Image (tube, rainbow, N blue to C red):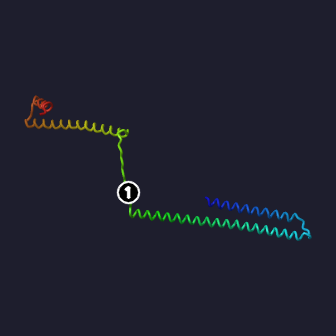
Amino acid sequence: MADNNNTFVLFEEIKNKLETIYRELKELKEKENGSVSLPVQSTLAQSDEQKEQELLNQYEQRTKDVINKYIGVQVRIKDEKAKSMDKLVASVLTMLHEWQENKEHPIPQEHIHRHSFDLKSSKVFTYMVAVSVLCFVSLVSNYFLWQRKQQYEDDALKFRIIRVWGGCSPKEILWLNDVFDIHRN
């Protein structure tokens, strides 16, 4: 963007110089046309022509200077662009080379995990309460499962005793229930 601004400024300078030259030449022509040429004043006309020629030479020199300045700036801009392109290409090549080296010989990375548990933290407290509730629910459910399993084992044992006895009366069944429910030993 700065290069475009420099170019714009140079074009404006050239435009202003050319407008100034054009105005001064126009004024000189108006003076020349407005003055009456007398044969006696031929030396004055020659001196005016010399002045005009000198002014033209000065304007031509100024124009050449402005054009040379513009060309110099354009050359400098091209050089800066070439340098920046060279830097860009060099940095891309360097990055590519480093990437290939890392790909061939990867550097092992160390992962450090640090955890801190503060019991005053609401998250840790909530977690601990949740784990405690889960443990309690698990204990209660395991107790009820154990009771059911025990009941099935007792029923299986009663069935075996009845089979061994070859049958049983209702009084004997009640006696077996009392033994298994109250007198386990």
Q: Badge 1: few (under 14), some or many (20 or more) residues near its Cα, within 10 Å?
A: few
Q: Quadrant of residue 40?
A: bottom right
Which residue is at the front of the view, 80 or 26? 80
Instruction: Look at the image and tell me in which quarter the C terminus lies.
Output: top left
Side of 75 relative to 171 (left or right): right
Label 1 sits on residue: 109
Side of 169 relative to 48 (left or right): left
Q: Percent position (x, y) of residue 88?
A: 52, 63
Query: Could you tell me how many numbered marks the image carries?
Result: 1
Image position of 72 with respect to 123: above or below = below
Q: Percent position (x, y) of residue 11?
A: 69, 62
Q: Percent position (x, y) of residue 149?
A: 19, 38
Q: Percent position (x, y) of residue 143?
A: 22, 36
Which residue is depicted at the point 50% across and 63% down? 91
Q: Amino acid at mark 1?
A: Gln
Instruction: Look at the image and tell me in which quarter the N terminus lies.
Output: bottom right
Which residue is at the front of the view, 46 or 152? 46
| Residue farthest to the top, as pictured | 171
